């Protein structure tokens, strides 16, 4: 089959736009909100080391596989998988993988929009001066007031989803492309500014010690599973986003090199965000690094609230987080929208509304899990914790494992050759061996041991 240069949705104008889009997808709440608190509650340094190893040894190869499938298929993940399965003469059940990943994507979008709503609301909360001079208790009270108010949560969740629809509606070039090319440079500038601020005003050395002191005896299988789940989540793999973006990638771009750049940016943002947040946390008395999901929303306002000009910087910080969340969430919406446009011939606007409404309704489960449903538990977890665990620690590793096996053993080698053109044969061999053996075995092992430890 001749290689298609473009699918029906168009393509990124250049490799650079793909890099910005994929980085925009990867860099999000996972880096700024989740990474610091998960690292904090899993002992810091040792977790970070395992996390980086997972990114390099499992994340990058699987991400390359996803981009390759997307670019070859030139369609939404569900249809691309179906075509490639047929072209490879494989068991048609492999195409369920496309469905599984899109399902994970929509589940993630549902809770992602709620958390992103917190960040949006904190722009106003910081900017309005309401949190001036708060102590730990008052900041915790303000945060729990937000969580206990379903109406406010729903309002912000709705605003956030509307922002996503506004971008995805515009299509690949004029919507997503322009958004990422504008937002990502702003994000980097703000982040570097905050790094400088926290270096001079925070307890930078304590933060660096916390994140880089590799104390391996604190490591359990459970935290290794959390590190792997985090690696998948942060690279946006296993949920169709990267496959969908791969479908719009220029044919000439080298997949391996491009993905390494994206993984580098993503890890750098996670580490820098960790440094910024912990410098500020450690500069403030009485706040534990293991504070959990509230880490960013409780400890930071305390710190910012007591610094001269801190409220403005705090508002800027939450603008940063919102931008990061926005450029990620659009990549969760796009695969679903693209699929509906391809299959049902529905226009982009309607397709957007349909999926935004689905994510919104599902998101109500997350909203209520913080207030009126906080007493209900599934496997000992609230609805939100359950969704988070189910997607990051079960669905994504599982899809990742299956994708690795699929590309490693099943996909027609001609497809692989044509997509990996220009890659050094030794690099390609290394990549294929990783997909065949290293990734499935380590994902399987971590998965089983982690679950065993969690539920035993
Ligand atoms: N990678 C994003 C983050 O770290 C989350 C995400 C997952 C975005 C999947 C898109 C797709 O926040």
Image: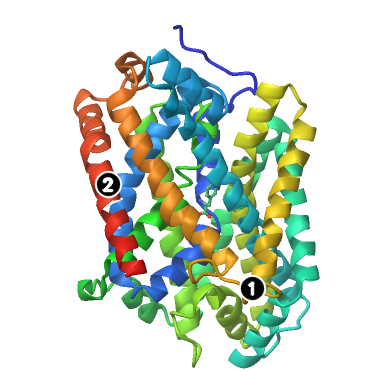
Depth check: give the residue in front, 146 or 186: 146
**As drawn, 138 above or below 97:** below
| Residue 300, percent from left and from top | 57, 78
Spatial CA distance of label 2 from label 1 is 37 Å
On residue 352, which mark appears? none
Point out the image quarter for the C terminus: bottom left
Please name the residue that numbered disc 2 is placed on: 57
Residue 178 placement (x, y as % from top left): 67, 37
Q: Please tell me whether mark 2 or mark 1 is closer to you in this view.
A: 2
Picture coordinates of residue 192, whole percent (x, y):
51, 62
Q: Quadrant of residue 148?
A: bottom right
Give the residue number, with chain letter if any, for mark 1: 313
- The disc, 2 or 1, on the residue closer to the chain's N-terminal end is 2
| Residue 192 in view of the camera | no
Residue at 46% x, 71% y is 37
Label 1: few (<14), some or many (≥20) within 10 Å? many
Q: Nearer the viewer, residue 185 or 33?
A: 33
At a point 34% along the width and 22% down the height, the residue shown is 411
- Give the structural element (helix, strand or loop) at label 2: helix
Left or right: residue 321 compared with residue 273: right
Query: Which residue is drawn at the image coordinates 38% and 27% (left, top)?
Result: 254
For the residue carrying disc 2, how many other residues have a C-alpha within 10 Å: few (<14), some (14-19), or many (20+)? some
Pinpoint residue 137: horizontal percent, then vertical percent.
62, 92
Numbered disc 1: secondary structure: helix
Q: How many marks?
A: 2
In the rendered image, the residue lying farthest to the top is: 1
- In the rendered image, which quarter is residue 171 located in? top right
Instruction: Classify residue 161 as left or right of residue 135.
Output: right
Res 174 seen here: yes
Direction from residue 412 to residue 169 in the image, left or right:
right
Q: The N terminus lies in which quarter of the figure?
A: top left
Q: Vertically, is 298 above or below 384?
A: below
């Amino acid at each position: 089959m001749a290689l298609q240069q473009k699918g029906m949705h168009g393509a990124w104008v250049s490799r650079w736009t793909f890099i910005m889009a994929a980085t925009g997808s990867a860099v999000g709440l996972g880096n700024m909100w989740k990474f610091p608190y998960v690292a904090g509650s899993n002992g810091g340094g040792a977790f970070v080391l395992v996390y980086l190893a997972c990114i390099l040894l499992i994340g990058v190869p699987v991400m390359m596989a996803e981009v390759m499938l997307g670019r070859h298929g030139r369609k939404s993940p569900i249809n691309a998988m179906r075509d490639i399965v047929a072209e490879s003469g494989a068991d048609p059940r492999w195409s369920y993988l496309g469905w599984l990943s899109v399902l994970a994507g929509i589940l993630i979008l549902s809770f992602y929009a709620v958390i992103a709503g917190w960040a949006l609301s904190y722009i106003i909360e910081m900017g309005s001066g309401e949190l001036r001079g708060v102590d730990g208790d008052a900041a915790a009270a303000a945060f729990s007031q937000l969580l206990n108010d379903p109406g406010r949560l729903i309002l912000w969740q709705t605003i956030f989803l509307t922002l996503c629809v506004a971008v995805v509606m515009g299509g690949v070039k004029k919507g997503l492309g322009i958004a990422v090319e504008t937002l990502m440079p702003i994000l980097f500038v703000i982040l570097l500014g905050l790094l400088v601020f926290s270096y001079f005003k925070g307890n930078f050395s304590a933060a660096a010690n916390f994140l880089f002191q590799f104390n391996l005896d604190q490591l359990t299988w459970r935290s290794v599973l959390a590190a792997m789940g985090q690696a998948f989540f942060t690279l946006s793999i296993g949920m169709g986003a990267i496959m969908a973006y791969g479908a719009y990638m220029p044919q000439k771009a080298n997949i391996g090199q491009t993905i390494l750049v994206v993984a580098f940016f993503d890890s750098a943002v996670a580490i820098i965000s960790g440094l910024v947040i912990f410098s500020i946390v450690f500069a403030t008395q009485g706040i534990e690094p293991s504070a959990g999901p509230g880490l960013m929303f409780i400890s930071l306002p305390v710190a910012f609230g007591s610094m001269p000009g801190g409220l403005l910087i705090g508002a800027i910080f939450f603008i940063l987080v919102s931008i990061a969340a926005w450029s990620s969430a659009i990549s969760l919406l796009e695969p679903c929208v693209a699929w509906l446009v391809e299959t049902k011939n529905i226009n982009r606007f309607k397709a957007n509304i349909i999926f935004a409404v689905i994510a919104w309704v599902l998101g109500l489960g997350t909203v209520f899990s913080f207030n009126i449903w906080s007493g209900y538990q599934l496997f000992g977890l609230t609805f939100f914790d359950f969704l988070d665990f189910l997607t990051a620690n079960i669905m994504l590793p599982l899809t990742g494992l299956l994708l690795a096996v699929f590309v490693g053993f099943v996909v027609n080698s001609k497809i692989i050759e044509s997509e990996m053109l220009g890659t050094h044969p030794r690099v390609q061999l290394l990549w294929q061996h990783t997909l065949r053996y290293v990734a499935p075995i380590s994902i399987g092992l971590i998965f089983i041991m982690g679950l065993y430890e969690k539920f035993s």
